[in-house]
Amino acid sequence: MSPTSDGGVLLLGGTGEARALAAALVADDVPVVSSLAGRVARPRLPVGEVRVGGFGGAAGLAAHLRLTGPEVVVDATHPFAATISAHAAAACAEVGVPWLRLQRPGWATHPAAGSWTWVGSHDEAAREAARLGTRPFLTVGRQSLASFTGPLAPAAALVRVVDEPDYALPATWRLLRDRGPYDVAGETALMESHAVDVLVTKDSGGALTRPKLDAAARLGVPVVVVRRPEAPAGALTVATVQEAHAWVREERGVRA
């Protein structure tokens, strides 16, 4: 990436919100570079310039900021990407670059949320899933599956991921490679066809993958939800692309 001496934006993340913000910034003729972690084999790419790969920790990101000179950084990574958020907070504080966290609301306001089993880790989620059923539907992401292979080894698990994990899963598990958006009818049919008796997910939030929760409520299937990690101390956080867009405009001295 070339230096952005005219006050561009470094946009972290490959989420739908990140892509929408990149499109809005490009439409405003704002120089923006979207940085993707590279953990998905065929990611949905945003408009504008894109870089793929890590930075080498907080120190590496700080060096990158000094080299390329973005005016602001927007962290629109996944709500569970706690490491890069912590690195972004530390690097931006060190270099003196304004930093904003764009994070979609979680699912705590879902009508059925009060009946869910909320847990603090994937290890705890695995134990609760083993207690609640024998035919779990795991939608926790490829990188978190290792926590479940022990406690749920004998289970007839349905596992949905975007990319296949690079290690062997229990023989009784069925792997489904798919990517949203989903709908309630489809999620209901999927859960019925596999006789799912417990849904395990994490509080990613958003509308694209919420239908599984609506389907579970419709079918009376218990749900185990992993809580989000804590935000970095002092993080300025907004919940919508519109708010993030307005913040970038204000930081760059452009008043709507």
Image (tube, grey):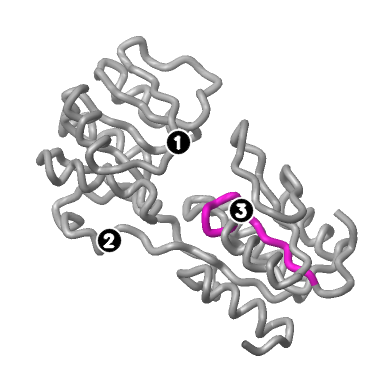
User: Which sits in the foreground, 65 or 233?
Assistant: 65
Count residues near mark 2 (Cα–Cα under 10 Å), then give few for <14, some for 14-19, many for 20+: some
Pick whichever of labels 3 and 2 is earlier in the sequence. Answer: 3
Q: Quadrant of residue 230?
A: bottom left
User: Which sits in the foreground, 239 or 224?
Assistant: 239
x and y percent of residue 63 in the render? 84, 59
Residue 200 in magenta stretch = no
Q: Is residue 235 above or below residue 38?
A: below
Pick whichever of labels 1 and 3 is earlier in the sequence. Answer: 3
User: Which sits in the foreground, 25 or 150?
Assistant: 25
- Say which element carries label 1: loop
Residue 16 in magenta stretch = yes
Q: How many marks?
A: 3
Q: Is residue 122 above or below residue 247?
A: above
Please name the residue shown 63% across and 67% down the image: 24
Question: Which mark is nearer the camera, 1 or 2?
Answer: 1
x and y percent of residue 44 in the render? 60, 43
Q: Which residue is mark 1?
A: 179
Q: Which residues are magenta?
A: 8-18
Q: Which residue is mark 3?
A: 13
Q: Which residue is mark 2?
A: 108
* Spatial CA span between label 1 and label 3: 17 Å
Question: Which mark is nearer the camera, 1 or 3?
Answer: 1
Please name the residue shown 89% across and 71% down the image: 5
Kind of residue sitting beneath label 3: Gly
* Spatial CA span between label 1 and label 2: 23 Å
Kind of residue sitting beneath label 1: Arg
Please name the residue shown 39% across and 49% down the image: 208
* Spatial CA span between label 3 and label 2: 23 Å
Q: Which label belongs to residue 235?
A: none
Kind of residue sitting beneath label 2: Ala
Q: Is residue 16 left or right of residue 97?
A: left
